[in-house]
Amino acid sequence: MPKKRGIFYTTAAIALTIVIFVTYSAYSTYRLSDKMDVIQTRIETVNFFIKDVEKDISNGAYIAGFRTLLSFNQFISTNGTFIYNLNERFKESFLNGTINQQPLSLMKDSTFTDWANKIAAEASKVDIKFGFTINDVKLNQTDPWNVDIGLNLSLDIRDKRNTSYWIRDRYLTTKISIVGFEDPLYVVKSNGRVTNAIILSNITQFVVGGNVQNLLKHANNSWYVAHNDSPSFLMRFEGNLGNSTYGIESLVNLDEFQAQGLTLKDRSIVDYIYFGTKSTTNFRVNATPEWFKIDGTLPAPGADKGEHLDLYQVRNVTI
């Protein structure tokens, strides 16, 4: 009997051990599975945040860039001077909201740094640490009618619970249309008395059968056309009257200048020539005001040479 009883106790002990082991294993597996679910949820949360940030970076850059250009227009109107070293001044305003360390009212709470700080604050609410470093900001043009903002930055996004992290260098370009911005040349060269918003001309046939009414409409509104002998929009901020592949130009309506008491110059009314010092041969145009002159040469060098007499189709209607 004692022997049988010992066998019984041994068998019971083994069975109990098995039950405990199975129960513990199941519990451990459940805890591990539960922990993995939590980690997976956190990783998905961070991934969703990253995707939202990547989408929103361009929006933040666009808003800060647009308001910086508006601020430049305001600065020039207030001070009557061009902005030199434009790329550096743009970077300063874009990130810090200042120009030459002076605050710009339109940039209050609207810099790219402000945007990043708001993102960081929202991230912190869901236990995500958002870090960023601006490596460089570039202002450029790759076509006449838009400004490109090139942003080189490093992102460091981490889950505060140490489940995941994401580090990446990004370079993005945001385009801003220049249509509607004031032309700095008009503001400075008229001592702030005449402004001219950049509006793309919808006229392609300036002279039709000797009739110059379309040309007069174009000139009276001082609309713009692209021309690679002219300065670009960004060059105009610096007062640079050189030529650019992405140049634009307008015809200066001297009636507006005269109405503001400004002395008229006997020059071509192509804006960068009128406001500059370049010596040109100028021609009067039939059925236009006496001040309406376009520069060019005779005989014609060829329509493909980009001369203003050909661009504005007036070579055969000059006086």
Image (cartoon, rainbow, N blue to C red):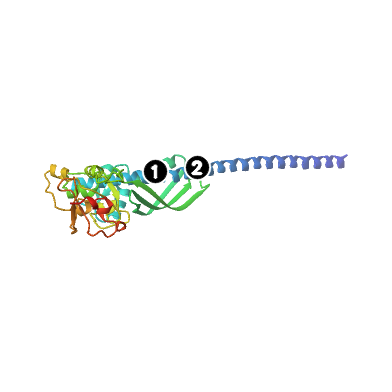
Which residue appears at 46% of the width and 53% of the height?
A: 168
Q: Which one is nearer the viewer's eye here, 202 or 3?
A: 202
Q: Position of residue 41 (x, y in %)?
A: 55, 41
Amino acid on which the number 2 mark rests in the picture = Phe
Q: Position of residue 61 (x, y in %)?
A: 37, 46
Q: Position of residue 253 (x, y in %)?
A: 19, 45
Badge 1 crowding class, 10 Å Cα cut-off, few under 14, some 14 to 19, many 20 or more, is: some
Q: Which one is nearer the viewer's eye here, 146 or 248?
A: 248
Which residue appears at 59% of the width and 41% of the height?
A: 37
Report helix, strand or loop for mark 2: helix
- In the picture, measured across the screen, residue 68 lies left or right of residue 158, that is left
Report if residue 111 is visible in the image.
no
Farthest residue in the right direction? Answer: 1
Marking on residue 48 = 2
Q: Which one is nearer the viewer's eye here, 199 or 113?
A: 199
Q: Nearer the viewer, mark 2 or mark 1?
A: 1
Q: Earlier in the sequence, mark 2 or mark 1?
A: 2
Q: Position of residue 83 (x, y in %)?
A: 24, 52
Q: Which one is nearer the viewer's eye here, 316 or 87?
A: 316
